Image (tube, rainbow, N blue to C red):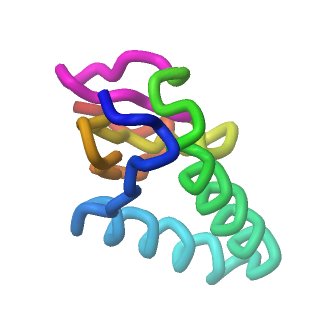
Amino acid sequence: MAKSESLAVNWGAAAVNDFRRIVEFVRQENPPAASRIFAAIAEKVEQLPSHPLIHRVGRVEGTREMLGMQTYVVVCRVGEFEIRIRRVLHTSQQWP
């Protein structure tokens, strides 16, 4: 595997849509909470290249699952040159 510092983080379309829906849903009832969720998950994702394999092995083969916040899971695939964010899910959602 390449040095972790050189791993790029790329978001898949499903993950972008998931993240956008989560933030917009929360923003309808609590804008400050939506901002906190956005910032916390974005910060965790930015830290992924430093320790890409520290998070638990995912339920889908070849993935890792990181808690973005207490109730949100970021599903990613760690490759040789990139970390691909696959999904951002509420922990109550059925996955896979």
User: Which residue is pictured at 30% across the width and 48% down the height?
Assistant: 82
Is 29 situated left or right of 3 in this image? right
Magenta span? 56-66
Residue 77 position within the rendered picture, expressed as x and y whole percent measured from the top left:
28, 37
User: Which residue is pictured at 44% across the width and 74% down the height?
Assistant: 20
Is 82 situated left or right of 51 in this image? left
Question: Where on the picture, by quarter, is residue 8?
Answer: bottom left
User: Which residue is pictured at 43% across the width and 35% down the height?
Assistant: 3
Residue 79 position within the rendered picture, expressed as x and y whole percent measured from the top left:
25, 37
**Does residue 53 sit above or below 14 in this rendering?**
above
Question: Where on the picture, by quarter, is residue 11?
Answer: bottom left
- Pick the quarter of the image with the N terminus: top left
Q: Residue 4 versus residue 31: which sits nearer the camera? A: 4
Task: Tell whether position 57 is magenta.
Answer: yes
User: Which residue is pictured at 61% across the width and 56% down the height?
Assistant: 41
Residue 49 position within the rendered picture, expressed as x and y whole percent measured from the top left:
51, 43
Q: Residue 6 versus residue 19: which sits nearer the camera? A: 6
Question: Where on the picture, by quarter, is residue 32?
Answer: bottom right
